[in-house]
Image: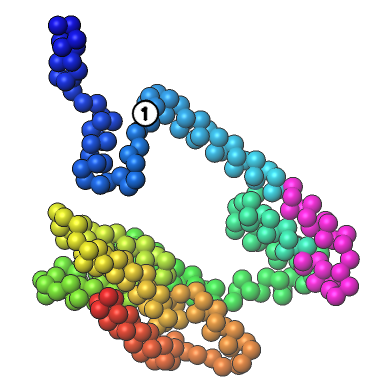
Amino acid sequence: MACSKRRNEVKSRPPSHTALRFATCLTTSECSGSAQFEKPERTKGHGVQENEMTEAQEPRFELTVKTVGLFAGPVLALLLWLTPFQSLSPAAHKLACVFACVVVYWVAEALPLPVTALMIPLLCVLLRVADAKKAFAPFADPIIFLFIGSFVLAAAMFRHGLDRRFAVAILSSRWVGRSPARLLFIFGAATFFLSMWISNTATTALMFPVGLSILRGMAPARRDFTRLRYSIALMLMASYASSLGGLATKVGTPPNLIGARMIEEHIHVTIPFFQWMLLAFPLAFLMFLLMWAYLSWR
């Protein structure tokens, strides 16, 4: 009687979480191979203590890296100074020392990045690598002011939400939402257009949440392989279209301005803003159409 009563108690006892998980693995094939039992969860208080210890250790580690970098930069520069280089002129030797010190400061972030950048011309003047006019002349280059203007334009668009309003206004059209291919094209075209005037990275960071909102609104209850491929295509469109849109104008991405400046200095050919668009926009838009066709077909 006692044995049968004990068996009934065992049968009536509710199954544990591990047993349910083990049964689920066997019936739905979620677990490949042999089922693995879950490890006992740690208590909430223990996890909070670990997080607090990690958060407390991070500033200490950053401070240690900055302190080490603050002294490692001058030490490395001094070692290079004492090391003879027969193939380098004295000015180039000094510049290599400055470069080594600045790189260490940038990696360790021993000083704020702008302060470290301003150290380069100052050290060049103090070490007589170049005079003050030549050392500080690049700060007054017209390309720098064009950079500033494009950044101000991008900041104004972000500040007032003009970019997001533009993207949402286009994508909310009924004509666009009726076809997945049209939605993909309009989403990429909006990304392409915005990237013509603001940074590629900023455009991608802007359009990614918009694309995720679109996918969240159209996601079915069950997983569909076709819908999964479309989600991948939409996310790739945000990245590729921003890269292609940055080619269409001189201010679309900083390398365009740097390349135009190098062409002007070395080949003595000046490319005006409209001429750049006349040459680059058709090519960039053609590549955009080919990319849209490929993503739609895939």
Q: Which residue is drawn at 41% across and 70% down?
A: 200
Left or right: residue 298 compared with residue 2: right
In the displayed structure, would residue 279 be above or below residue 202? below
Q: Magenta span covers which residues?
A: 71-96
Frontmost residue, 131 versus 83: 83
Q: Does the magenta stretch include residue 97?
A: no
Left or right: residue 50 compared with residue 104: left
Frontmost residue, 138 versus 290: 290
Amino acid type, label 1: Glu
Residue 246's quadrant in the figure?
A: bottom left
User: Is residue 3 among what the camera can see?
Assistant: yes
Frontmost residue, 40 versus 267: 40
- For the C terminus, the image quarter is bottom left
Q: Is the magenta stretch mostly helix, strand or loop?
A: helix
Q: Residue at x 34, y 33 (%)?
A: 37
Q: Residue at x 53, y 33 (%)?
A: 56
In the displayed structure, would residue 145 be above or below residue 281? above
Residue 100's quadrant in the figure?
A: bottom right
Left or right: residue 97 compared with residue 203: right
**Element type at mark 1:** loop
Q: Check disc 1 and report the residue beneath it.
A: 41
Frontmost residue, 244 versus 150: 244
Coordinates of residue 184 in the picture (x, y in percent): 23, 73
Coordinates of residue 159 in the picture (x, y in percent): 34, 60
In the displayed structure, would residue 136 be above or below residue 111? below
Q: Does the magenta stretch include residue 86?
A: yes
Coordinates of residue 103 in the picture (x, y in percent): 67, 59
Q: Which residue is drawn at 74% across and 47% down?
A: 71
Coordinates of residue 252 in the picture (x, y in percent): 42, 76
